[in-house]
């Protein structure tokens, strides 16, 4: 079997048989990789703690029919604070689940997504414990950049229904249609009635924040002063938008909404 080397982040793992582990990885070279680590659950395994969730690793694999086989692994970066904090762990799982359920396969964009995952895990690891709003802020940034990388960016500069240019003044509002893929002008908003795709009515503050999201780097984004309701509404909106356009539920979103009731729309 041909072998190859790559870097990867561990997004998911589960047991196989009595001693093996199936590992789902994301690599900057080839995107998603499904692999097996033989004997990884043995006490004296050669892998030790290297194949823990969210670790970034250098590894050597052999190509297989359905699963590649991990021959060697060395830790590049482990995030010690994430497994110790329940909320940090859940939000990192949200990132992992979004990547896994998108079935991402673009070799050209894989390095960008790999860097984005690393960047967000690193920021989450360094946050003070218990700061849910800052976790949500990082997730909002992740989803915006993830949508941009994967080609699902919503239309924000013009109406996604009629194509009219938008100029939303302070105090005005605009609609947002998840199934049409972006904002809806006032005229189309009035004619749409109770359309099931019309998820939100956005105030000018929320609309302006949504527009900024896809253009700002992290430092400028992090420096923005945001009202709590603006952050939470856009967090919920982008989560629903992502689930619709990847055509898959993201269970962690549902669970987080249940355990953080103030965030429900």
Image: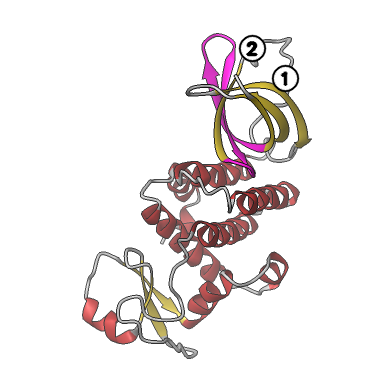
Is residue 104 or residue 86 the one in the foreground? 104
Mark 1 or mark 2: which comes first in sequence?
Answer: 2
Is residue 185 or residue 88 the one in the foreground? 185
Marks 1 and 2 in Cβ contact (< 8 Å):
yes
Q: Which residues are magenta?
A: 8-30
Spot occupied by residue 208 in the image (x, y as percentages of width and height): 53, 79
Spot occupied by residue 91 in the image (x, y as percentages of width and height): 58, 47
Badge 1 marks a residue whose secondary structure is loop
Q: Is residue 70 above or below residue 19?
A: below
Circle on res. 47: 1
Identify the main secondary structure in magenta: strand
Give residue 83's quadrant in the image: top right
Badge 2 marks a residue whose secondary structure is loop
Spot occupied by residue 10 in the image (x, y as percentages of width and height): 63, 35
Q: Residue at x 41, y 57 (%)?
A: 240
| Residue under label 2 | 39
């Amino acid at each position: 079997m041909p072998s190859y080397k790559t870097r990867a982040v561990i997004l998911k793992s589960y047991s196989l048989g009595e001693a093996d582990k199936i590992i789902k990885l994301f690599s900057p070279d080839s995107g998603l990789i499904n692999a097996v680590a033989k004997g990884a659950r043995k006490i004296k395994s050669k892998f030790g703690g290297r194949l823990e969730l969210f670790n970034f690793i250098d590894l050597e694999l052999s190509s297989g029919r359905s699963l590649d086989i991990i021959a060697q692994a060395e830790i590049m970066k482990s995030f010690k604070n994430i497994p110790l904090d329940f909320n940090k762990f859940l939000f990192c799982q949200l990132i992992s689940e979004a990547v896994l359920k998108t079935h991402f396969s673009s070799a050209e964009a894989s390095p960008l997504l790999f860097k984005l995952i690393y960047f967000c895990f690193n920021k989450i690891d360094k946050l003070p414990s218990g700061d849910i709003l800052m976790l949500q802020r990082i997730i909002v940034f992740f989803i915006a950049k993830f949508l941009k990388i994967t080609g699902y960016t919503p239309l924000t500069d013009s109406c996604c229904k009629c194509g009219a240019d938008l100029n939303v003044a302070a105090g005005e509002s605009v609609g947002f249609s998840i199934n049409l893929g972006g904002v809806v002008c006032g005229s189309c908003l009035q004619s749409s009635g109770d359309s099931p795709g019309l998820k939100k009515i956005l105030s000018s503050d929320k609309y302006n924040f949504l527009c900024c999201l896809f253009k700002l780097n992290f430092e400028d984004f992090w420096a923005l002063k945001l009202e709590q309701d603006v952050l939470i509404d856009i967090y919920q909106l982008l989560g629903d938008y992502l689930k619709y356009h990847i055509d898959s539920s993201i269970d962690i979103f549902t669970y987080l909404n249940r355990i953080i009731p103030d965030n429900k729309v």
